Structure formats: structure tokens, C-alpha cells
Amino acid sequence: MKLGKKEIERINKALGGHLSRQGSLDYALEKQEDNRLGDYTKLAYLWRAILVDHPFSDASKRTAVYLALVFAEQYRKIPNKDLLIYHALSIAKNNITNIRNITRRLKNAIF
């Protein structure tokens, strides 16, 4: 995905939060440069960082869903918004950290 840290921070700020811890988000952003990973897996790393590790003070779920919608638009995919919201809530509530699981959920909601 073609968004950097500053853009993600700006999106979160517009949705009502601010960056309070950056380590996990930095790691997820490093993964965006790994050419061995698929696009959905790269998005899954961002989702895990945002939904489970809570780098933002507020609006984490909204930020994650918004990033998924940006991803869908950039890759000309069709998002199921309701399913994205469901998965974001489920991942956050259940502290799901398994990247394969998150990737599978994203592929299920963006096709």
C-alpha cells in the first residue's frame, strides 16, 4: 500500500486520535517494504499493529477500516464494508495476532 507513517497518522488524527506509541506501527511499516510478502499480508501487518497493539489513543478500528478501503481502491478491489467492520471489531476484541488469520479475513472482505 502506498501510505507512509505521516499519512496514517494524519488519517487517524482526522478520525479523532493521535499516535501515542509507535514501535509496532514502525515494524508494520517496515514490512511494507518486504517484497517477499503479498499485498494482503502487508495490510495484515498494519491491521495487527493498529487493532491489537493500539499505537493510537483513539479511532484505531476506524483507521484500520479506512486503510482497508484505501487498499481496495488502490488495487481496484471490491470491499465488503460490513465484513471489514466485523473483522476489525473481532480482531481487536479477541486480540488476534496471527498474520495468516488476519490475511485470510482481509481476503474474505476485499476481493
Image: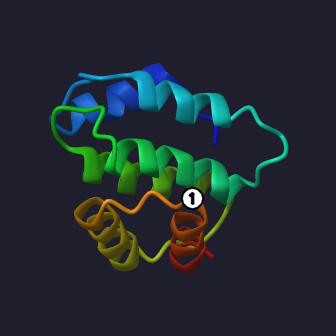
Q: How many marks?
A: 1
- Front residue of 99/29: it is 99
Image quarter hosting the C terminus: bottom right
x and y, in percent, of residue 4 in the image: 54, 26
- Front residue of 96/78: it is 96
> Which element is circle 1 on?
helix
- Front residue of 93/88: it is 93
Image height of 10 relative to 83, above or below: above
x and y, in percent, of residue 55 in the image: 30, 32
The amino acid type, in three-letter code, at marker 1 is Ile
x and y, in percent, of residue 81 in the image: 38, 72
x 51%, y 76%: residue: 109
Image height of 29 relative to 110, above or below: above
Residue on which the image places disc 1: 99
x 52%, y 61%: residue: 98
x 33%, y 41%: residue: 53
